[in-house]
Image (tube, rainbow, N blue to C red):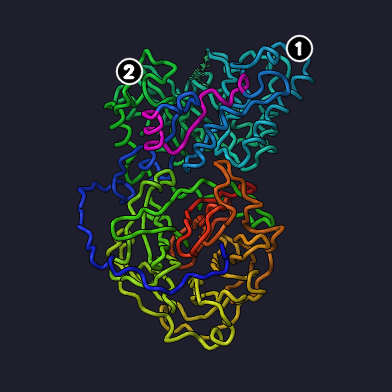
Amino acid sequence: MNPLKRPGRRRASVLGLLAVAAMVTPTTVTGASGAERATTLGAQAAQSGRYFGTAVAAGKLGDGTYTSILDREFNSVTPENEMKWDTTERSRGSFNFGPADQIVNRATARGQRVRGHTLVWHSQLPGWVSSLTDANTLRSVMNNHITTVANHYKGKIHSWDVVNEAFADGGSGAHRSSVFQNLLGDGFIEQAFRTARTADPAAKLCYNDYNIENWSDAKTQGVYRMVRDFKSRGVPIDCVGFQAHFGTGGPPSSFQTTLSNFAALGVDVQITELDIAQAPQAAYTGTVRACMNVARCTGITVWGIRDSDSWRSGENPLLFDRSGNKKAAYQSVLTALGGTAATQRADTRSSRSAAALPSRFSWSSSGPLISPKPDSTHNIAGIKDPTVVRYNGKYHVFASTASASGYNLVYLSFSDWSQAGSATHHYLDRTAVGAGYRAAPQVFYYAPQRLWYLVYQTGNASYSTNPDIDNPNGWSAPRNFYSSMPDIIRQNIGNGYWVDMWVICDSANCHLFSSDDNGHLYRSQTSVGQFPGGFTNTVIAAQDSKYALFEASNVYRVQDTNQYLLLVEAIGSDGRRYFRSWTASSLAGSWTPLAASESNPFARASNVSFPAGSWTRDISHGEMIRAGHDQTLSINSCRLQYLYQGLNPHASGDYNSLPWRLGLLTQTNSTC
Ligand code: G2I
């Protein structure tokens, strides 16, 4: 591939104009968030900012019925047995990650999150550990096990069950007897959490147990006292897992009280292994409602998919029957996940506290999540240049479609990344946006006018507006920001192209950034009141050599700080795309390098891990997942995510026909 060959301004096929898509008006029901009711568990849970997961067995991943339900319904997975000590370290110092890797890599590639289960447990513990008799040996064995396993999965685990089932049943409220308790004493749990935090600072660390759902039980009270003590002394604990293995009666009546009392200690709560004997609808509804009614109940995991997959299969406790059909309880759960207006969780990303940006970054990438969906009039080769907002319980993605005949735009929306691949692609050349050269979109809500803006390049810097982001047919015909190319760009552009327009506003002004593929980043300015008119005073905001400051800039406000973040795409010495980063204290300010070199990049193949396989060496044009959706483009500095375009490294040929796909980076060195 010639990395410098630019998209030509050839006109897109006019065939698109002939295909007036039949308008399909599905009957929809509106859920609590105002969004339509979803039709799968994961998507419905995502509308309130929660996940819905299942236990997964590596041995079943070859079963097509099993995997099709898994991928359709669930956006979180927990390896049922594969991360337990008797699999991961059957003999001392010899680690086996094969079966768990299978589950984790598969999930990560599909945008499903992973719960790690479990680092320290008295059961499924190899004999060589349970027969140790020396405390110092056991302590170093335990720490080494936690460190090695957590390190192996670093950046890939959303929540770890650090310690499982350490409390005794019955009326004592004390720890149960185990080799850990007996040799190391009460402090072993604290030790395990501290070791896990050091090994994977980005993962949430949970204590997980059963029979702690009833508030007045001595066991519940024992765990509660421990969590309260940990929080008061700064022992790192982030969440409590309630297994929820229930009898036919379902949860105890105090379950919601228990969840909220724990949450009030400052931890998230999760339902981690749900199954209910005979799966009564009322019992499932009650369980899901208890979680929905507690803001810090972040998700629910059922302990298996079909009744035949359950450890209690004789009791038919799950949501799918042996043939994989949905049971009545499935419908109850789906409905209960729709919740009521009171059950919406605040956006978890924006509710986290702000931290300063680090000066080095590392990332984990999904596999390709969004690929072209050609239809009879759109023979698309690549999907590129994504822009994304989360609004009303859904991600709304706009992107360029690339083909030999040129560029246009596409829109898709979905509740959760695990659903991205199955979303419908709406081609905007069929709308007033029109056919012809339109590329590199940016979307935001312009709050002062209560209008959505889609900014894109047409040769000029153009935009369309829409009162309803959900309606792809609502976009206006293109209008231009400038009457013609500003003089300063004309004087500096050389043989480059004027591309990648980007708008961001502070409280007084809006700024329009653009690139020239010739080492210059430009910025024009207008007032918030005049926008979208009045962009003047175009200046060079940053410059470097052509490849070092190429194109695809993004500028964001870092929430709760006075910092702005600038990203610009560069072409590395290996010919591959990557991002450099700078910060400034104002949008008009001068930009200070943050992670801005090939050896310390913002995002480059060299600081990205690819658990699902190295499907790209380019980390190219995309954008950050924002904390809000308006023109101030705020991001939360905690656990950054970046939607980008990547490319099969072996692809070659005409630049416009390259098979670009979209993947998601998640920061792995976040400390919050
Ligand atoms: O016991 C139910 C769950 C209670 N909480 C912790 C969970 O980790 C636990 O899960 C179950 C698995 O669902 C079973 O699949 O843990 C059991 C072991 O305690 C698992 O059972 C084991 C059998 O004991 C083994 O004989 C078998 O080789 O499953 C293994 C794999 O099928």
Image point 52% across, 80% down: which residue? Answer: 524
Query: Where residue 518 sits in the image (x, y, percent)?
Result: 60, 76
In this view, 499 is above or below 271: below
Distance, label 2 to label 1, CA atoms, is 43 Å
Query: Where residue 631 sits in the image (x, y, percent)?
Result: 45, 68
In this view, 381 is above or below 193: below
Residue named by callout 2: 278
Quadrant of residue 2 within the rendered picture: bottom right
Which SS class for mark 2? loop
Image point 43% across, 61% down: which residue? Answer: 629
> Which residue range is magenta in the image?
64-87
Front residue of this view, candidates 611 and 576: 576
Give the class, few, some or many, for how many residues have Cα within 10 Å of label 1's Cα (few <14, many ≥20): few
Give the class, few, some or many, for how many residues have Cα within 10 Å of label 2's Cα (few <14, many ≥20): many
Q: Residue furthest front?
A: 653
Side of 362 where 45 appears, left or right: left
Check the picture and name the quadrant holding the N terminus: bottom right
Image point 37% across, 61% down: which residue? Answer: 410
Give the number of the disc on residue 133. 1
Side of 345 where 538 appears, left or right: right
Q: In this rendering, does residue 264 appear at all?
A: no
At label 1, the amino acid type is: Thr
Mark 2, ligand 1, within 8 Å: the answer is no
Mark 1, ligand 1, within 8 Å: the answer is no
Query: Where residue 308 sits in the image (x, y, percent)?
Result: 38, 19
Q: Are marks 2 and 1 in contact (CB under 8 Å)?
A: no
At label 2, the amino acid type is: Gln
Which SS class for mark 1? loop
Side of 119 where 466 appears, left or right: left
Q: Of label 2 and label 1, which has the lower sequence position?
A: 1
Query: Where residue 175 sits in the image (x, y, percent)?
Result: 62, 18
